[in-house]
Image (cartoon, coloured by chain):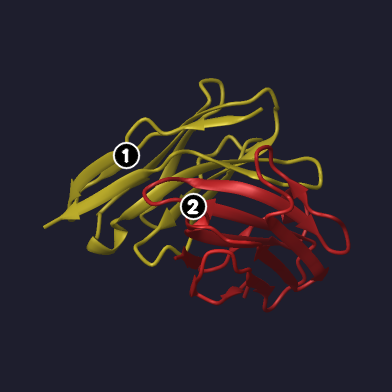
Chain colours: A yellow, B red
Amino acid sequence: AQTVTQSQPEMSVQEAETVTLSCTYDTSESDYYLFWYKQPPSRQMILVIRQEAYKQQNATENRFSVNFQKAAKSFSLKISDSQLGDAAMYFCAYRTSTGTASKLTFGTGTRLQVTL
Amino acid sequence: GAVVSQHPSWVICKSGTSVKIECRSLDFQATTMFWYRQFPKQSLMLMATSNEGSKATYEQGVEKDKFLINHASLTLSTLTVTSAHPEDSSFYICSASPGTGIWGEQFFGPGTRLTVL
């Protein structure tokens, strides 16, 4: 079974600074998808960024980028120019690329605080 | 696009009663829907996966008779918490997926907060 580990329960960053959230995972599969989701106080899950394992290029979405190290099974999220609205819980998630279930396995989450 | 709604957004009920939560995909057909439970300050725990017209597949440790899931159409799934007790109080989130593989993206509903008195 796949597992996802987020070793940072809480992180803090000053506005306009850069922060990196860590995520490691364990799998025996060679093809899969990795995600970072944001859950603000409203509790609505928002997809931040997606990475397909077969792609070597790291995904980027505006101020959000990932550092995907397949051999190390590491998938960190970098938030540049942090904004107050980035404060939220961030969940790393894994999804297999095969089968009909397409279940997501979530990490335990990292709470990000953004300070002035 | 890819909007998922949940109703109600919050519900309070008495112990022993049943509560139904609806999950709808508003602008796409969902071949698969997922139900999650989230306790305060914790991650999402998958309860079950349902495919339209089929019986739901429950995760280990989830009581099938307590958490009844029906996926009657490609746009609607319901979760019924039967004979609810205070320990069932939680935040329930559904997600819907239009397909598998590259099309297996999950789109999340806004969640339902259940409080059992």
Instruction: Find disc 1 in the rendering and name its residue.
Output: A20
Amino acid type indicated by mark 2: Glu
Residue B75 seen? yes
Query: Dot 1 falls on which chain?
Result: A
Left or right: B1, with A68 as reference point: right
- Per the image, label 1 sits on a secondary structure element best described as strand
| Residue B87 - label | 2
Marks counted in the figure total 2
Mark 1: give few (<14), some (14-19) or many (20+) Cα within 10 Å: some
Q: Secondary structure at mark 2?
A: helix
Provide residue A82's location: percent of width, then percent of height. 25, 54
Q: Position of residue B2 (x, y in %)?
A: 63, 71
* Left or right: residue A9 compared with residue A34: left
Give percent across and percent down for residue A88.
33, 55
Q: Residue at x 51, y 21 (%)?
A: A72
Mark 2 nearby-residue class (10 Å; few <14, some 14–19, many ≥20): few
Work out whether residue A18 or residue B31 is closer to the camera in this orientation and state it.
B31
Q: In the rendered view, would you say B13 is above or below B57?
A: below
Instruction: Give the residue displayed 55% in from the left and 77% down from the top.
Output: B8
Of the residues tagged 1 and 2, which is closer to the observer?
2
